Each structure stands twice: as C-alpha cells, then as structure tokens.
Amino acid sequence: MYFAGQQTHSSRQSWLLRGACLALFMLLSACGFALRGVTPMPFDSLYVGIPDNTQFGADVRRSLRAASPNTKLVDSPKEAQAILQQVADTRTLREVSLNAQGRVEEYELGINYTFRLIDNKGRALIPDTTLSIFREMPYDDQVVQAKQGQIDTLYKAMQRDLVTRVLRRMTAPDVRRAFENAEERGENGEIPLYDPTAPQPQRTPTPWQTPSTTDPAILR
C-alpha cells in the first residue's frame, strides 16, 4: 500500500544515487584510475618462447589472451612484432631447520625464472629479468608420500603467482614506451640486442624429488 508522495520520494532517491555513482566514476577517471581487467599491449602480434606443452606455458598464454585480446599469439618469431624469450627456469630446495635428532623439519622451495621481451629486430623491451619466489614447507620424513604431494601443490601455486608477475611486467607502461621508442633508442645504442630467432630452451624443470639431506643435487 503506497501513501501519497512515497513513490515520488523513492524515485528521487534513485536518481540521486545514480547521480552520485556517475560523479564518483568521473572523479576516478579524472584521477587516472582504471578498473582491472583488459590491459592491451602495444604490439599486434607476440611469439611466446615457452613450451606450450607445460602448465606454465599454457597459463602464460591464457593470461596474455585475457589481458590483451587484440594481440595475436603467433607460432613463429618471424611473424611477431614482439618475442617473449625464456632464459632460465630453475627450482631450488633448501633445508631451513632441523629437529633435535638432526632430521629436517622445514624446507624452503624456490623458483628463479629469467625472461626477456624483445621486438622483431632483437631490441630489448624488457632486458633479462629474474623473478624469484620462495615458500617454506614443514616436512615429516614419516609421511614422505603426503609431503611429495604437498610439494607439488605448493609449486603449482608458486607458478600461478609467477604467471601473474610476468604478466604485470609485460603490461607495464614502460614496455609500451620502450616499444614505441625502440627505433630511436636502438639508433642511439641505448638498448641491448638479442637474436630474435635464437632457439629457446625447451627444457621442462625436472619434478621435485623426495627431499633428502644427503642429496646435494636438490639442495642449494
């Protein structure tokens, strides 16, 4: 049941709310605020030199397509305006603490990933950059199988974090400036040059092995 003037008052509140939202949006826009989501890269085509048969390679490609849908991912560096090159991808496993019996209680897992982004003439848009991620994990040698699964799960989470960091670096404003000014910077000798057709390492990092205090191959 409506009383006289109630509907008019409600309509007035609705219009005031819409006006306030519009004013807030315009204020945020004027301050340079942008909603997260699509972040177009300045180049029209990109070659990703990361094995596409790995989860990491697949996640990188999926994130790039979502962030910059107008950038085509091509199958050859010769077709690309920009090339993402994988330089190194290593894992580390380090003892953090021991118990009174000298048994390992905690390990530190690490990923050190090095990449670069160049244009089709080999000019660096992002010079060699290493991203490192470390996570600590409690360990009990009485339940090795369960801990092996925990290592794999933790590594996958670290890898997802790595994808986010690579994407954030590639979509940064300075990359757009570097691409737009590559010709001038190249003539001035300000940027390193790389071979855009150089074969990229197709190695997939070996799976984590069961932690051992006597195996130096998995310790750093």
Image (cartoon, rainbow, N blue to C red):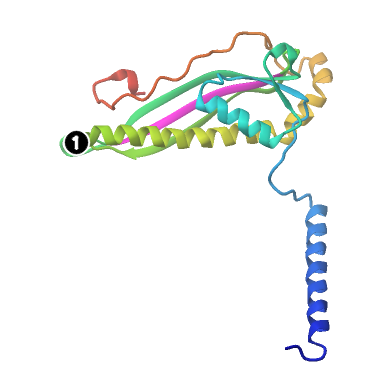
Give the answer, above or below, for where 27 lies relative to 214. below
Quadrant of the rendered structure where residue 134 is? top left
Residue 168: x %, y % from top left = 64, 36
Quadrant of the rendered structure where residue 70 is? top right
Q: Nearer the viewer, residue 32 or 156?
A: 156
Q: Nearer the viewer, residue 1 or 128?
A: 1
Number of labels in the image equals: 1
Q: Nearer the viewer, residue 61 or 107?
A: 61
Q: Residues within 10 Å of mark 1 (few under 14, many from 20)?
A: few
Question: Which residue is identified by label 1?
Answer: 142
Is residue 193 visible in the rendered image? The answer is no
Please name the residue shown 82% across and 63% down the image.
23
Residue 127: x %, y % from top left = 65, 22
Q: Is residue 81 left or right of residue 219?
A: right
Give the answer, above or below, for where 54 lies relative to 165. above
Please name the residue shown 73% across and 11% down the image.
78
Q: Amino acid at mark 1?
A: Gln
Residue 149: x %, y % from top left = 33, 34
* Chain part drawn in magenta: 106-118
Is residue 182 visible in the rendered image? The answer is yes
Residue that extends furthest to the left in the rendered view of this protein: 101
- Main SS of residues in magenta: strand
Q: Is residue 113 magenta?
A: yes
Please name the residue shown 83% across and 78% down the image.
12
Please name the residue shown 80% across and 67% down the image.
18
Q: Is residue 100 left or right of residue 218?
A: left
